[in-house]
Image (cartoon, coloured by chain):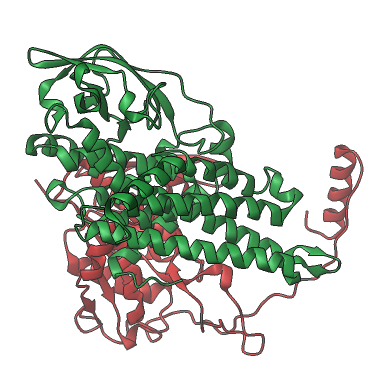
Amino acid sequence: MIKIKIVVCIKQVPATTEIKIDPKTNTLIREGIENIINPFDCYAIEEAVRIKERLGDPDIEVIAITMGPSQAIEILKEAISVGVDKAVLLSDKAFAGADTWATATTLARAINKIGDCSLVLLGKQTLDGDTGQVGPELAQKMGIPFVGYVSNILEMDQNKMKVKRLMEDRYETFEINLPSAISVIKDINVPRVPSLRGKLKAKNAEIPVWGAEMLGLDVNEVGLLGSYTQVVKIFTPQIKHETTLIEGTPDEKVEHLYRILKESHVV
Amino acid sequence: MRYFLTEEQQMIVDICRTIVEERIIPVRAELDEKEIFPRDIIEEIGRSDLFRLFIPEEYEGMGTGIFEICLATEELSRGDMGIATSFAACGLGIIPILIAGNEEQKVKFLPQVASGSKLAAFGLTEAEAGSDAGNIKTTAKKDGDFYILNGTKQWISNGGEADIYTVFAITDPGRGVRGASAIIVEKGTPGFEFGKKENKLGIRSSATRELIFTDCRVPEGNLLGSEGMGFIIAMKTFDQSRPVVGAQALGVAESALEEALNYSKVRKQFNTPISSFQAIQHMLADMATNIEAARALVYHTAKVIDSGEKNVSRLSSMAKLFASDMAMKVTVDAVQILGGYGYMKEYPLEKMMRDAKITQIYEGTNQIMRNIIALDLIKRGVL
């Protein structure tokens, strides 16, 4: 029997409720802000652990990886505390400033290095970058199918899986061969609370750190140098507090709203 | 307040805090209102390994002590004392097996509780046997390789929800309390049924039912220790479990103080926050001081028990007595600080006050606690 390996890609992000932008420099104020696992990635971690439990095979290995600075090791430990078996940190000065493309290059190479991966799980997007691009780019680079916005894994065995995904106006069901990559949405599960044994395991876990050289990556492929896009400016949009309250019966309100939208050339 | 916790103890606290914040607080008012036993939250507690705290490592537990159980119970009680009761009552059902169970019984029952797949319960109280626990009427008559149980246990926490029950019954009617024995009865045994769920003042998310035995045949291998040891097993169990009731009282009191303190800083009367009034300040100061005093006593008692000291009845009773009286006073005062709002169900204070009351009553009323303390004082002196 082939040993199933599931890799979960996660990211450390600043806790959103506390995000503050320096109005002068338009950059994120990072001092004193707690870092957390990107919330969407928590669903990916939970789903990976549930797949392992559901298939009831103790040989299934769930591996979490993240690319980030050395303190990102904390979220890998957190992943272990909720049931992930192993973790790898991808960290190198050369990785800094990566856009989604360079990130996907790095992650894809790391997953190939881990080897024999049956399934790659990701959160649908990150809270900070918000692009949702790394998953599909990663799958493209690995040459495997990708299904985004999965809300339910209906069936899974060693060779294939059947998944349901949420689109804006409908659900779609796919049967895909493994290996594949999927990104998940929050409807898929309720992530568990860490366990005491998990926390103790996390505390003693040895987490290897892989850099560009170990992954056989050229510095021009990764980080800022390997990126096709650059963040030129971040700014907080000016919000004008002009509110018009539309009153009347529902029909009148719709009529009125339509008129406003038409006049402002929205419709 | 830091209590020099080890890293592992801090982990226990952190896990409980996460469960309280993410799972319990959002639903506690509804659980209380509708008397829902939250099976899903109990399962989450199980998945988090918290039931393993009751159980030694060789039976798939975490091999910790009463102190760690107190820490977990205190934190859970900050969220909902009903859930903390279900948790602690499971421990109460397990302690007799730890005290008097043989290897076979431990191997059979303890791992199931450790993993959280099965809950335990403790069945002593009867209609005519509350404080007078020696007056139990449930009988267990030997018949070949079985005991035949008849009688009704009353107000049993986790009744109906648990799978493993430690039941106290009379095996030798001529010997009074020395004729009582402790027997494990599994849910599903023919002749073992449950009464209706009790409608309670507080801890309404916990399940309290009668255990009804009608010619219920239990294998003799389920007897804990030997015949006649039941009452001693029960009393030794309470020695260990009473500080845990103290920990419940601590948790609910801390939570009430926190609510009252936060409210006092934002509630304005006479154009100023009510926390600026000395009348309120002194109430808050007394609440906080009494909580700290109770915590010191509960933690100290737990650590004395964990050190292996055998003679702990006095201290255990003191911890339960002092902490529960404190919690009743603190929760009443917290409601008072919130005034009319405290009396309303929109705020969690009135529930905390209702929940706190049981800590003065169960696992021995506070009057019985004083009896135990006084008798031990007279027998062994001041120490």
**Residue closest to the eye, B3 or B110:** B3
Residue A29 spot, x, y in % from top left:
56, 83
- The image shows residue A128, relative to residue B163, as above or below, that is below
- Residue at 69% x, 49% y is B342
Give the position of the C terminus of chain B as an image quadrant. Answer: bottom left
- The image shows residue A66, relative to residue B17, as above or below, that is below
Q: Could you tell me if residue B376 is visible in this image?
A: yes
Q: Could you tell me if residue A156 is visible in this image?
A: no
**Residue closest to the eye, B2 or A124:** B2
Residue B220 spot, x, y in % from top left:
11, 22
Residue B170 spot, x, y in % from top left:
23, 21
Drawn colour of chain B? Answer: green
**Residue closest to the eye, A138 or B310:** B310
Query: Viewed as shown, does residue B331 lie left or right of A223?
Result: right
- The image shows residue B287, relative to residue B34, as above or below, that is below
- The image shows residue A251, relative to residue A144, as above or below, that is above
All told, the count of numbered labels is 0
- Residue at 32% x, 46% y is B241
Question: Residue B113, located in which quarter of the rendered image?
Answer: top left
Residue B341 spot, x, y in % from top left:
73, 50
Chain letter for red, please: A
